[in-house]
Image (spheres, rainbow, N blue to C red):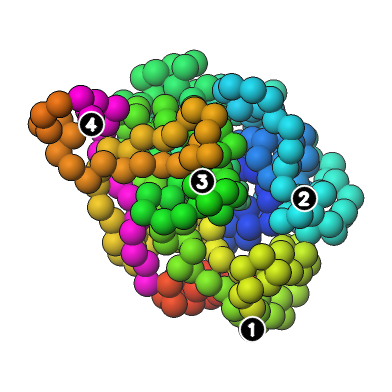
């Protein structure tokens, strides 16, 4: 079977850990590497957490360190109240002996896309800064990357980091606006669907019964993260953000999409980080109102999902040894 070549850009993050495990358990993938970025935690901790996951999984996959800050401004805060101070549910498991490669995330992304023209799918489950840095390093990657699948944004629903914005986009709205405006194939797996993919505590408990080293570790990071959701969202479980992007890559038929250009609010106002789709025919509408969307590529936006099938798929893959 021709395996699908992927790079995962990640900011582990509790749900990133489950998504990485899901990818590691999916034989359809040839994981070329993981690239790290600030977001849930600083990039140093994101890298430590990524290396630990691969060490526990006993997988020798390159890890390249990425951006420590957004394109504009500096990274000043993670979300310790969601993912824990360590980004892994305050489990504080010792770091692994593995080391990242010398190349930066942007250099690694460019290297791999040019080495495998038309074959590499970039799955971004954190802020999008590394993707922009890679584009700036070598703009031709837009012509030869297979697809960008990103967990982020909220096209037709409220945000989670603020009433307006989803966390990954809010962490670097300028980067998101550039990624959503570049001439490459992009699918946005945003809150429009991830807030419909709900993993009940009973499913988390069933998954945790599998005591293989990686599954036991990932399951140990969830109680803190789950407690946040119980308190913040009054739900008995968690929404499934990053793993939904992995599932989209493997089973896109479980999702419904619409195609339209998307802009990101980047000015410092209460709507900063909101992703705004334009359903109108922005290239032919008269007047200047739709100018910001004119000549922007149409993005594949996930707007509906068969959430029970997604949960079943994830559960099956995670309880495998
Ligand atoms: O909004 C959810 C996203 O923000 C997920 O990627 C989660 O890990 C955080 O990074
Ligand atoms: Ca993430």
The reply to whether the magenta stretch includes residue 182 is no
**Mark 4 vs mark 1, CA separation in Å:** 47 Å
Does the rendering let one see residue 84? yes
**Mark 4 vs mark 3, CA separation in Å:** 21 Å
Q: Nearer the viewer, residue 284 or 187?
A: 284
Pointer 4 residue = 290
Which marked residue is nearer to the observer: mark 3 or mark 1?
3
Which marked residue is nearer to the observer: mark 4 or mark 2?
4
Pointer 3 residue = 165
| Quarter of the image where the N terminus is located | bottom left
Q: Dot 2: within a 10 Å radius of its alpha carbon, few (fewer than 14), some, or many (20 or more) residues?
A: some
N-terminal of the pair, mark 4 or mark 3, is: 3
Q: Position of residue 17 (x, y in %)?
A: 66, 55
N-terminal of the pair, mark 4 or mark 1, is: 1
Q: Dot 1: within a 10 Å radius of its alpha carbon, few (fewer than 14), some, or many (20 or more) residues?
A: few
| Quarter of the image where the C terminus is located | bottom right
Assess mark 2: CB under 8 A from ligand 1?
no
Residue at 36% across, 46% down: 187
Q: Secondary structure at mark 4?
A: loop
**Mark 3 vs mark 1, CA separation in Å:** 30 Å
Left or right: where 5 falls relative to 184: right
Q: Position of residue 248 (x, y in %)?
A: 40, 58
Where does the magenta region start and end?
288-306
Pointer 1 residue = 202
**Mark 4 vs mark 2, CA separation in Å:** 39 Å
Q: Secondary structure at mark 1?
A: helix
Measured along the vertical axis of the image, is residue 311 above or below residue 130?
below
Residue at 36% across, 41% down: 276
**Mark 1 vs mark 2, CA separation in Å:** 25 Å
Q: Secondary structure at mark 2?
A: helix
Pointer 2 residue = 80
């Amino acid at each position: 079977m021709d395996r699908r070549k992927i790079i995962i850009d990640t900011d582990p993050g509790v749900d990133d850990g489950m998504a990485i495990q899901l990818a590691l358990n999916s034989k359809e993938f040839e994981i070329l590497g993981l690239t790290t970025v600030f977001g849930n935690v600083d990039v140093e901790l994101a890298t430590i957490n990524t290396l630990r996951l691969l060490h526990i999984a006993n997988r020798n996959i390159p890890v390249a360190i990425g951006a420590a800050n957004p394109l504009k401004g500096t990274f000043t805060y993670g979300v310790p109240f969601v993912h824990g101070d360590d980004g892994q549910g305050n489990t504080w498991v010792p770091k692994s002996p593995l080391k990242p490669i010398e190349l930066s995330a942007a250099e690694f992304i460019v290297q791999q896309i040019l080495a495998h023209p038309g074959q590499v799918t970039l799955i971004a489950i954190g802020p999008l800064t590394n993707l922009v840095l890679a584009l700036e390093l070598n703009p031709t990657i837009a012509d030869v990357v297979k697809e960008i699948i990103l967990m982020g944004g909220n096209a037709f629903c409220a945000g989670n980091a603020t009433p307006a914005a989803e966390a990954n986009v809010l962490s670097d709205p300028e980067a998101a606006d550039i990624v959503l405006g570049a001439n490459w194939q992009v699918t946005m797996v945003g809150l429009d669907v991830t807030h419909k993919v709900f993993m009940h505590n009973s499913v988390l408990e069933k998954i945790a019964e599998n005591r293989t080293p990686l599954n036991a570790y990932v399951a140990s990071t969830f109680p803190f993260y789950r407690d946040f959701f119980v308190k913040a969202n009054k739900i008995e479980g968690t929404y499934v953000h990053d793993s939904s992007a992995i599932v989209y890559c493997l089973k896109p038929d479980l999702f419904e999409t619409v195609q339209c250009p998307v802009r990101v609010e980047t000015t410092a106002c209460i709507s900063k980080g909101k992703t705004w789709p334009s359903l109108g025919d922005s290239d032919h509408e008269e007047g200047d109102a739709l100018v910001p969307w004119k000549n922007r590529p149409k993005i594949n936006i996930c707007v509906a999902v068969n959430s029970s099938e997604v949960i079943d798929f994830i559960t099956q893959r995670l309880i495998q040894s």
